[in-house]
Image: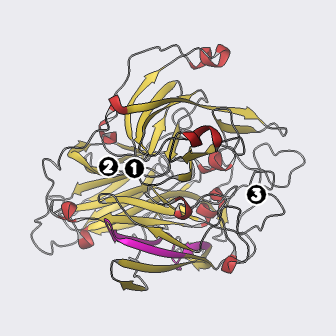
Amino acid sequence: MMMSQHKSPNLSKFVEPLPIPPVLQPCRKDGNATHYEVSMTQFQMSLHQELNPTTVWGYEGSYPGPTIEVESGEQVYIKWLNKLPSTHLLPIDHTVHGAQKELPDVRTVTHVHGAIVEPESDGYPEAWFTKDFAQTGPYFVHEIYHYANPMQACGLWYHDHTMGITRLNVYAGLAGMYIIRDQRERSFHFPAGPYEIPLVIQDKSLNHDGSLYYPRQTDPPVAGLETSIVPEFFGDLNLVNGKVWPYLKVEPRKYRFRLLNAASCRFYQLSLSSGQFFYQIGTDGGLMEHPIGIQQLLLSPAERADVIIDFSNMEGQRIILHNTAPAVFPGGDAPDPSTTGIVMEFRVEQSLTYIDISAIPASMGALPLLDLTQISKYRNLVLDSTMDHFGRHVMLLDSKMWDDPISEKPLLGSTELWAFLNITGQTHPMHVHLGFFQLIDRIPFDAERYQKDGTILLTGPPAPPDPEEHGWKDTIRANHGEITRIVKHFTTYTGRYVWHCHMVEHEDYEMMRPFLVVRDSTQINNV
């Protein structure tokens, strides 16, 4: 575990308003096609008024990047442009696979997280490119990505996915929201317009001159290395939409918040100081069957939640959004109640503009469940670790490195059950590319016995998904000592994708594997 010993400056809380990322406007539209050009650049911005401006990276001069809003089925074309300098903002460990010294330090590739998209447009980690496409990775295909958006309304996000340096590029600022809309969602009359707000939550550490802090070394340092990847990184400041501990003035009415945990490794267990409920209406992949009222909402890295908070009859109150999740999760240190335990503040101090006619419907329609009788393949996939020759932990999937032969080759049109057996001692947020899946259950098992002789000894009954997990997911918590079972239908596209832990330090140091969707069974053994 890497808990940074660095201490950020002591900053005042709730002194600046919450920034709202702009909605990106397309370059042009022709027919059903919408075209964007999105530049990644380095710039300075104020993360807190008591600090000097911070040098960050971002999309279109914004950190987080601008929100991209599209319609379900809209044909969207995006040219992601690397306009970054040749020197990285943060320390690179060249011993990490994919970050060798012979590769350019600054390279990027953007992944729309949760998208159902052709492999050439998925942001494959080895499809990176440098400034003006001067150099490209071995899986780079084309400069313009195509997003067909063949899914219901949902809240996705986009972020860098470059092999070996994802943690650095995302920490530098390369992340933003991608929201798909449709008429069905509009028919429910959720809070909209200025009453629908994305909340991109991250933790960071800052130096006293305002610059980003990221550790060069583990604690204790690795002998013989100038820079070493750390097992996990946890900052001591929480930022929302790029601002440290902001406040948001709200009217006494309902608001819809699109929550995203965009942190490197930190889990967030969110609650309101007023004790009131979040009314959750959606998961990663869109609307749930019906809203649920919950007082605590747990989000692992990369998970999203679509929630409504009702500030009616709360005029004049100030409500703090708290975090109580340990780091590392679930057995690490509790957050400091004066720093990482605080996320932001809501101030119910604005007058009601007009009568609130938005709704929290009783039902949003049945969720189509994947048919478990149609499962054609069951896969047991072990989350484990080993030690490298420097004595560092390397997190692995099924005891395999990135470059080992591809072992997961689902057949196009098939339904598979993937069971994650976690023997690592901590929870991992597991993300599978190419759309969504459904969580079946979690079954406790004897992890020590499995490590000893490979025997799967169940130690309790299956636990159903938590209420907030009832819906389409693309990222799910796989807890230590549990078998987390998901079911996924592999449809739409064939080709090469990835599955990985979304704690990005883990992802960068081998806890990521390719999978290949094949068109017919003859390819399973031949590809």
| Magenta stretch bounds | 56-79
Instruction: Name the residue carrying label 1.
Output: 322
- Between the C-alphas of marks 1 and 3, the distance is 37 Å
Q: Secondary structure at mark 1?
A: strand
Tag 1: residue type?
A: His
In the image, 396 versus 233, the foreground residue is 396
Q: Nearer the viewer, residue 357 or 407?
A: 407
At 41% across and 82% down in the image, what residue appears?
26
On screen, 221 above or below 312?
Answer: above
Q: Earlier in the sequence, mark 1 or mark 2?
A: 2
What SS does tag 3 mark?
A: loop
Examine the rendering and report whether any part of residue 288 can be seen. Answer: yes
Q: Is residue 278 left or right of residue 210?
A: left
Quarter location, residue 423 = top right
Residue 99: numbered disc: 3
**Callout 2 amino acid:** Ser
